Image: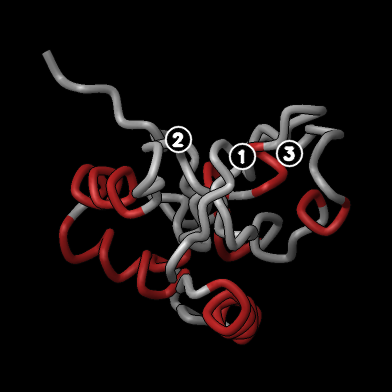
Amino acid sequence: MVQELKYQSLIAACGMNCGLCIGYLRDKNPSGGCFKKDDLNKPGSCRNCVIVNCKALAKTTSGFCYECGKYPCSRLKRLNTRYRTKYGMSMLDNLNFITGKGMQSFLENEQSRWACENCGAGLSVHRPFCLECKAEVKK
C-alpha cells in the first residue's frame, strides 16, 4: 500500500507548497490552495495571482512553470526572491527538485522537511514557530 503524501495536489505551478501557507493551515476559513481558483477564503493577491492566471502556463502539459519557454519569468524570480529572503524557502529550488527527482520524491522531502522537530505537526512557511506546540522553527 502506498502511503498518502501529505502535500499531494497542493504544489502550485510556481513551486509553492500551498500546504505550508498560513492561509491553508489556519483554523478559521482556510484556503484550499492555488488550484481552487474560486476559493473566496484565499487572499485577493492569491486569487488574482499573475502566475496562476498566466496564459503561457495554461499552454503547458504539466501545469508547472518549469515547462514554460519563459521560465523563470521575472514575476517568478521576484516571488522567489521575496520567499527566499523572508521565509527561507525557494520556489525555484522546489521546481528544480521536482524536475530532477520527481514529484514523489519532492513530496516525501517536503513531508519531513516541514515537520516540527518538537511535536511532528506540519509547519507554516509564514510563521517562525509551530502552530501546534509553539516551538521555534529553525530555518
Q: Amino acid at mark 2?
A: Ser
* Occupied quadrant, residue 92: bottom left
The image position of residue 58, as x and y in percent, is 57, 53
Vertical position of residue 38 compared to residue 123: above or below: above
The image position of residue 59, as x and y in percent, is 52, 56
State which tag comes first along the sequence, 3 or 2. 2
Left or right: 52 with respect to 72?
right
Q: Residue at x 49, y 75 (%)?
A: 88
State which tag comes first along the sequence, 2 or 1. 2
Which of these two is toward me, 5 or 125?
Answer: 125
Disc 3 to disc 1: CB gap under 8 Å: yes
Which of these two is toward me, 131 or 54?
Answer: 131
Left or right: 77 with respect to 90?
right
Q: CA gap, disc 2 to disc 1?
A: 8 Å
- Closer to viewer: mark 3 or mark 2: 2
Name the residue tied to disc 1.
Answer: 35
Q: Residue at x 48, y 81 (%)?
A: 72
Q: Which mark is residue 37?
A: 3
Q: Which mark is residue 9?
A: 2
Label 1's element?
loop
